[in-house]
Amino acid sequence: MDFLECKICHVPYDENDHRPRIAPCGHGLCSACVKTGIKYTILECPKCKKKKKNTYVDDIQTNYDLIEVVKAFRSKNISLKREPESKEYGSINDDVCRIHRKAISHWCFNCQIWICVECLEYHSKLVSCSTTNSFKAMKGMKEKHFTDIDMLLSDFEEGTSSAKSQIQEHTDKRKEFLESAEKHGEEAKKLGNFLRQGTMYKERLEESKQFLNIATTPLAFSDKLKDLTQRKLIFRSWSVKNLGTTSKLGLLKALKEKKQVYTEIVIKDVQKMYGKLSQNEENIYFHTFFKQTVADDCICMPFDRLQKLIHNEPSLVFLELTLGGVVKGRVHIRLDQKIPKISENTIKILTGQHGPTLRGMKFNNSSDHFISLTKLPFKEIPVTIGSSGRTIPKIGDVRGYFINGYLETLYFYVNPPSIVNIMDNLCVIGCIEDGLDIIQECNNNYGSGVEISDCGIVIKLE
């Protein structure tokens, strides 16, 4: 049934890409061969080589009668593919062209098929086709696929190595976990209850948001707004408690057990948000902020970068000295240089919930006095700089407080506009029970920024 296949590519006709068409010269060919035969709107018949200008694929007439014949054969499940006339011709598996029954010699990159010398003559005339020797083609294919295989095997080795390492890590952690399974089980249960509570608060907050969005009258809007505000405060309160369960707090507890000490400086700018909150929101926000500095939301840097940041960002700056260990002794503030006249500027020193907390001192033109930190959820212990009643302390003046217990964090912050002057001249001194450890740790972190004095360990802000 050769009349049911294209005389050029020898592919059986169909109703799609190989639709039978009649060239102007009368030869039959399929739509695919018409496309490859047209170059710059000139159709060259692959059979007789006659040319016709200004020709497009749709200009070539479709042989609808032949399409009906093809449909009839297919409806009776009659194969339109050409079968080998005898076994001596072989098959495609025997490296013989299925069209011309000749040995395969080349590969067509465009058609993605193996071809013989007769096929090569036709494919070479098509602009879209590119051919090569079968041996070169096989060599190139092998190199490409072997390269892909090598890359896959390399990725496999890396992946398995990482997986083995993680398996060992998880095995070790599992072993540690099993040693304190009961304790961790209780903690997990508490956290589960805590998260379920938070999920409930979250759903209520989202519900209030939706209600506020669909409110159409002022009274309804006010009611929904009041409800939303209350739920916001509840959710923020829950978030504050949630921050207390973060990994860094666990690290501090571990350091306490090992009686080790470490330090870091944390810089925070909260001035953008300050002043935009209600009294209750402000209390919750500041409490959340201080808890975050003990968690992961912080910027740690050595002292040599601290001054540059303060000069570049002269806003409300917080310094955190995290000791995270058992402290026994005095923590001091010492003035190393003369501070220029300070008016309405505040130095406040605070500590976290697990240790003693301090009240700050305010400088003014008449006398030094302690201010109450009513906006901050911390207890207060007075700390002074210089002699009582002195507006401008003398160089070398030191005043401190005694600690005997676990100190988690010291916070220092200063209000503008004289923040640069204060930071240039203020240093923090800490006396620790295991003094050698903190000296070594500070020197590792900050180099020459740490020294020993009569008062204890001096960490200079310079």
Image (tube, rainbow, N blue to C red):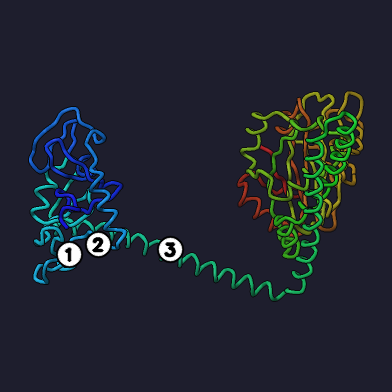
State which quarter of the image contains the N terminus.
bottom left
Asked if the residue at tag 1 contacts the one at tag 2, i.e. Cβ–Cβ closer than 8 Å, the answer is: yes
Q: Which residue is mark 2?
A: 79
The spot of residue 461 in percent (x, y) is 69, 39
- Report crowding for label 1: few under 14, some 14 to 19, many 20 or more residues within 10 A (C-alpha): few
> Residue at the location (76% across, 55% down)?
432
For marks 2 and 3, give the CA distance: 51 Å
Mark nearest the camera among 1 and 3 is: 1
Q: Where on the picture, by quarter, is residue 249? A: bottom right
State which quarter of the image contains the C terminus.
top right
Q: Which residue is mark 3?
A: 158
Residue 331, compared with residue 282, is above or below; it is: below
Amino acid type at circle 3 is Glu
The secondary element bearing badge 3 is classed as helix
Q: Where on the picture, by quarter, is residue 175? A: bottom right
Mark nearest the camera among 2 and 1 is: 2
The spot of residue 347 in percent (x, y) is 81, 35
Amino acid type at circle 2 is Ser
Q: Which label number is shown at residue 83? A: 1
